[in-house]
Image (tube, rainbow, N blue to C red):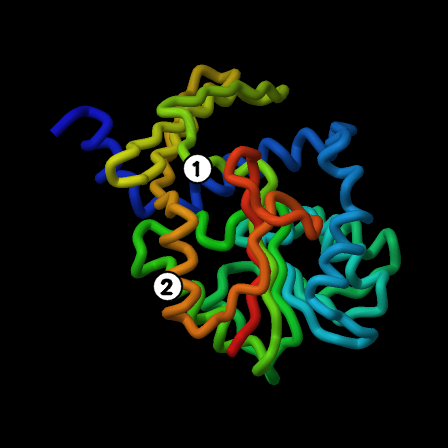
Amino acid sequence: MTRMANMLAENRGDDYAWSEQTTAGLVHWLRAGGQLGEWADNTLADIQFASQALQLTIDDTVLNLSCGWGRHAIALANHELNVIGLDASASLLELARETGEQMNVSVQWVHGDLDDLALAEQLNAVVQFRGNLLEWAESPADALHMLDRVHAILRPGGRCLFGTPDWELAPPLHRQSRAETAESTQIYHRYFDPDSRTVRSQTIVFGQDGSQREFWRHTWHPTLEQVASLLYQAGFHVEGQLNGFSFSPYDPNRPGLVWLVQRG
C-alpha cells in the first residue's frame, strides 16, 4: 500500500475535521474584510432563478443545504420564505447567525447534515447553491442515502435544485492551491482517480509556531448518467439539466451541471 493510501485509510473518518479546518480559513478571511467578488455578486440572480425553478410562493418552507455563511439563506428569507440553513461547519454557521442578526433576518440555522434534521412537516423545496448535493458521498450507496433523505423531507411534488457552475466531467488528475492567514499557511491538494471516479482532497496546515496538521477528505465524483440513475432510484423526476443557475439546457461542452428535480 502506498504512503498516500495508508494516510487516506487512517484519515478517512476525518471529513468533518477537514471541513472545519478548510472553512475556518474562509471565515477568518471574511472577518478580516475579504471580498468574494463576482462569486457573491450572483446572489440575487441565483435567488430569482431558484424561486422560479422551485415554484416558490410566500411562506413556503425551503431548506438551503450547505448554506455556508448564509448569503443565499438570508436572501431567500428576505423574499418572505421560511428558510432553514443547514451546514456541517460550525464556523460558517456562527458567521451566518451573526450576519442574519445584523440584517434582522430570521433563518433557522442547523449544524450538521441531512440525518440531523428533525422536521415537524415536509418541506416545499430543497436547494443547494454552488455545491453538488452528492459531494460528501464516498460511494454510490452514500449518494443514494442522501437522495432518499431529501425525498423523505420533501412533500409530494416538492422540488430540489442542486449543482455547481464549475462542475467538470473529468476533473484534473491533480490540483493544488494555497492560502495564507496570520496564524498559518494552508496547502490544498486534490487528486482524482478516473477509474474509480474518486477524489482525495488533502489539506496541510503549517502553523506559525512550527506545527503541522494534515486532513484528508474522500469523495465520489459520479458521471451525469450515474446521478440520473440514482435520482430515478430515489423516486425523483428530472425536470432539468443545466450548466448553471439559469434555464439554459445542459451542454457537455461547457462547464457546470445543475439539476432540477421533483419528488414523485
The residue wearing badge 2 is 144
Quarter location, residue 47: bottom right
Q: Which mark is residue 182?
A: none
Distance in Å between CA atoms under marks 1 and 2: 20 Å
Q: Seen in the image, is 182 located left or right of residue 217?
A: right
Q: Is residue 110 visible?
A: no
| Front: mark 1 or 2 | 1
**Mark 1 surroundings within 10 Å by alpha-carbon count, few (fewer than 14), some (14 through 19), many (20 or more):** some
Instruction: Pick the quarter of the image with the N terminus.
Output: top left
Q: How many marks?
A: 2
Q: Label 1 amino acid?
A: Leu
Q: Is residue 231 visible?
A: yes
**Mark 2 surroundings within 10 Å by alpha-carbon count, few (fewer than 14), some (14 through 19), many (20 or more):** many
Identified at 76% across, 62% down, the residue is 51
Identified at 68% across, 47% down, the residue is 69
Q: Which mark is residue 169?
A: 1
Above or below: residue 103 compared with residue 169: below
Measuring from the top left, give residue 150's x and y in whole percent: 50, 69
Q: Secondary structure at mark 1?
A: loop
Measuring from the top left, give residue 103's x and y in whole percent: 87, 54
Q: Seen in the image, is 261 located left or right of residue 39?
A: left
| N-term mark: 1 or 2 | 2
Question: Is label 1 in contact with label 2 (beta carbons under 8 Å)?
Answer: no
Above or below: residue 15 compared with residue 183: below
Measuring from the top left, give residue 149's x and y in whole percent: 45, 70
Measuring from the top left, give residue 213's x and y in whole percent: 39, 27
Identified at 38% across, 62% down, the residue is 230
The answer to which of 95 and 189 lies nearer the viewer is 189
**Among all residues in the image, which is located at the extreme left?**
1
